[in-house]
Amino acid sequence: MEYFIIYLLVQVESFACLFAGFAKISIVTTAIVGGMTLFVCGLESCSSQHSYTHILTNGVPKYILKWCKRLLVTGLVCSVLATMLPTQKNLAIIVGSGMVYNAVTSDTGKRIANKAAEALEQKIDAILTQSETSVEPVQGERT
């Protein structure tokens, strides 16, 4: 499992670039194909007796419009995925903070924290009692 997490940490930016590239390609392709289809329908309506909406609903093959819609939705989903994927640095921070939280909230972490606090208190008390017993005048002070 650790190797998979390391793999995701290393490859997350590659996935984001892949999603962003596919999103750009699909959205641009949809815009070009859809725009050309609408342009051709407009030209055909000028040269024929049918209206633009009639040609658009009856003259354009339905699979072109269906595939344009699919490409557009796929492009939008990929762009959302590319935006939502964190960078490698952010993912390392997220995973690292999760591991630290698990370590701190574990029983061993609590036991170590209590021992460290007790040792720190003892050290501070020892320094304070030592400084109280041996008060030396500061240089430049008159006694």
Image: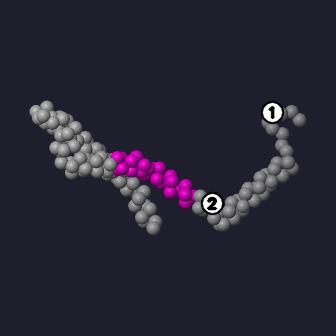
Residue at mark 2: 104
Residue 118: image location, x then y, percent:
75, 59
The residue depicted at 68 percent of the width and 62 percent of the height is 110
Q: Residues within 10 Å of mark 1 (few under 14, many from 20)?
A: few
From the viewer's perspective, is 21 left or right of 54?
Answer: right
Segment tinted magenta in the rendering = 76-100
What is the quadrant of residue 57 in the picture? top left
What is the quadrant of residue 29 in the picture? top left
- Residue 36 visible? The answer is no
Q: Secondary structure at mark 2?
A: helix
Nearest the eye: 131 or 52: 52
Residue at mark 1: 140
- Residue 138 visible? The answer is yes
Which comes before the other along the chain, label 2 or label 1? 2
Q: Secondary structure at mark 1?
A: loop
Residue 76: image location, x then y, percent:
34, 47
Most prominent secondary structure in the magenta stretch?
Answer: helix
The residue depicted at 83 percent of the width and 33 percent of the height is 141
